[in-house]
Amino acid sequence: MNTFELDKKYVAPTYARFPIEIVSGKGSIAVGSDGKEYIDMGSGIGVNSFGFCDNEWIAAVTKQLNAFQHTSNLYYSNPCARLAELLCQKTGLKKVFFSNSGAEANECAIKAARKYGAQIHGSDCHTIITLKNSFHGRTLTTLAATGQEAFHQNFLPLTEGFVHCEPNAEDLRAAIDANNVCAIMFEVIRGEGGVLPLDAEFVKAMSDIAAEKNILLIADEVQTGNGRTGKLYGYMNYNLQPDIVTTAKGIGGGLPIGVTMLGEKLEDVFAPGLNGSTFGGNPVCCAGAISILERLDDEFMTEVAKKSEYIFSELGGAKGVEGLSGMGLMIGIKAEKPAKQAAVECLEKGVLVLTAKDKIRLLPALNIPFDELKKAVQIIKEVCAG
Ligand SMILES: *Cc1c(COP(=O)(O)O)cnc(C)c1O
């Protein structure tokens, strides 16, 4: 049997895959088993920050693989400690917990917020407010956090203690008044929800209410983090200081890693035994992440901004394009034709794109070369116009 047949027969059918098999890749070019080359404008859902098989990343990962691949959290290891240092230096946050995915990073944030809420406001203070159209993961608790009913179906009952509100100050105040709230969790750009950035006014109101009531702010930067929006973390585009920042996807450059960063208020929230992960802080994943994070400097971000401007200027007002949303290299395109259809047509013309709700979603590698970006954007333009 070929890969398609094996997958259909043996892999649980939770994914609606596109009909291609990737066999190799370099940079932003993916090679299919049909021998065709594709320009990758999705980077594995914002994971391959420096594209496929980036040389520096491979060198960092293989160096660590040749030293030791795993040791458990019973012992110290340098890549884990150094990555934590780098993250704290770059964000000003104080402590880092490592896990293996975005959902787990959010689970840790939720645990930290509930423990803090109970300590500060009493044991009934455990409600977390999240936004409508948010996405926070697939575990039962992060599904509960996810503000989209469609994801909840079939899996009830979910973890209690989540209230979803619209991203406007009035709704948020009402939700806070009606519940005993320990935290507000949000994506600065809701990714799966349709690439929807928060407006600065709402962020200011949220930040003010949180300060006034000593409610924690949890930024879910699983998708928006690590240079994706043109700043190191998405919240840095706003006048905002979260108490907890979670990330995953792009920080690993292609290996699984989840990160929960804890600010001053939460520095001492955990003690030995209160959270853990067998693979968390895996030295190979951490070595790869260090190689990614170290390269996301101001000069590199300027290049990301240029590429972003190029995409916005080419596709803004283009034929068949109703509107654009997003920031940096996290971009939603509302086309006249259905997004799924556009994605299939792009694929047929050699460009891999993602979708989010009714939009085409672009999350290219941050280092995509300009000539490949230009080719891909022209094809997307053609598809939208046709
Ligand atoms: C992808 C994503 C998650 C879930 O990450 P996993 O690694 O799939 O568990 C959580 N939050 C946001 C904002 C995401 O984009």
Image (tube, rainbow, N blue to C red):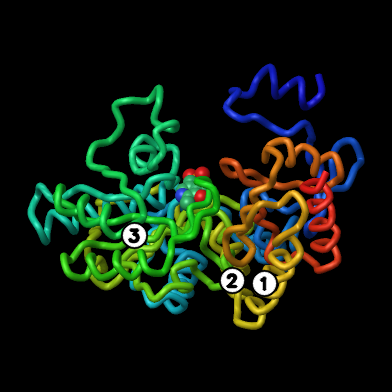
Question: Dot 2 corresponds to which residue?
Answer: 230
Comparing 373 with 333, the one in front is: 333
Give the percent coordinates (x, y) of residue 229.
57, 66
25 up-or-down from 343: above or below = below
Measure how far apart labels 1 and 3 are at the Cα level: 25 Å
Residue farthest along the bottom direction in this orientation: 299
Give the residue type at disc 2.
Gly
Of the numbered discs 2 and 1, the one sitting upstream in the chain is 2
Give the percent coordinates (x, y) of residue 188.
45, 61
Measure how far apart labels 3 and 2 are at the Cα level: 20 Å
Quarter of the figure with the N terminus: top right
Horizontal side, residue 344 vs residue 65: left or right: right
Quarter of the figure with the C terminus: top right
Residue found at x 15% / y 53%: 177
Comparing 210 with 32, the one in front is: 210
Residue found at x 13% / y 54%: 118
Of the numbered discs 1 and 3, the one sitting upstream in the chain is 3
Horizontal side, residue 345 vs residue 186: left or right: right
Q: At numbered mark 2, what does the secondary structure look like: helix, strand or loop? A: loop
* Residue 304's disc number: 1
